[in-house]
Structure formats: structure tokens, C-alpha cells
Amino acid sequence: MSETKVPSDRYYTKSHEWVRVEGDRATVGITDHAQAELTDIVFVDLPAAGKTVAKGASVLVLESVKTVADVYAPADGTVGEANPELKAHPELINQDPYGKGWLYRLNLAHGIDPKELLSAEAYQAHLASGG
């Protein structure tokens, strides 16, 4: 297995989302590993701003040429915005999953406990163990 790119400036979930926390807001996307597993993403069912989500609940659905996959909330909160570029260009998720391919921003209800998420090193270990 080739070494997957895992930036150290954010947290990760075992369900392959990345989370960058900035104050009481978190930007969420899927990892490079997840986009590679999904293959070519062709449609994103983006959530509406103002949608209330619970930690662990599905926030949106990604459709690829291979499958359909849910993306889950890393914490309780309200969707602040979804990435408008993905409507016309869902391939940005494959091309730049940690940058232009971000999915949505979550206004956090209670903050995020970093102990409930994985560091870049812990996520890499999770991948190495077959996670």
C-alpha cells in the first residue's frame, strides 16, 4: 500500500473525514484515502446552510462511479455553509481533498474534544491496521 497523504494540521475520524477546527467552527472534508477508495466522485448532495446535525449522523452523500457514501458529522452543530464549487465540480474532491475539495463548514454547538478524534499519526496507524 502506498503512503497516503495525511496533513498534520487537522484531525481525522475513523470513518475517513478530516476536520480542521477554527474557534467554534470546523471545516470538514474526506481524506485522500477515502476519495481514492470511492474513485471518481460525480455528484455531491450538499447540505443546506442551517441544517442541524448530531455527532455521528450523516450530513451529506457522495456519489461516485463505484458507490454511494455518507459523510458523517464529527460533532453536534449547524451547517454554516457547503462548498458551492462542488455542485458544478465534484471532481475537486478527488483532485484536492484537503483544499478546494472541502465539503462543509460546521458551526459547533459545544466545540470538539480533540481526544474524540484522531491525530494525523493515529489516522495513519488506523489506515495501516486496515481501517
Image: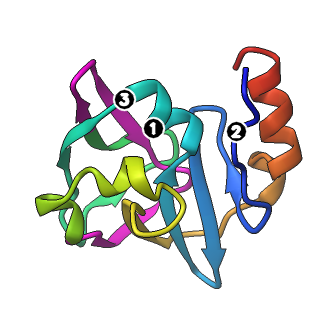
Going 74% across and 26% down the picture, which residue do you hit? 127
**Sequence-first disc among 2 and 1:** 2
Residue contact at pointers 2 and 3, CB within 8 angstroms: no
Per the rendering, the mark at residue 4 is 2
What is the x, y in percent for residue 75? 55, 55
Q: Which quadrant holds the N terminus?
A: top right
Report whether 9 appears left or right of 37.
right
The kind of secondary structure element at disc 2 is loop
What is the CA distance from the residue labelled 2 to the residue labelled 3? 15 Å
Report whether 48 appears left or right of 22.
left
**As shown in the figure, which amino acid type bears the numbered disc 1?**
Gln
Q: Residue furthest bottom?
A: 23
The local crowd at label 3, few if under 14, some if 14 to 19, many if 20 or more residues have their Cα within 10 Å, is some
Going 39% across and 47% down the picture, which residue do you hit? 94
Tell me the residue that label 3 is attached to.
Answer: 39
What is the x, y in percent for residue 105? 42, 70
Tell me the residue that label 1 is attached to.
Answer: 35
Range of residues picked out in magenta: 62-84
**As shown in the figure, which amino acid type bears the numbered disc 3?**
Thr
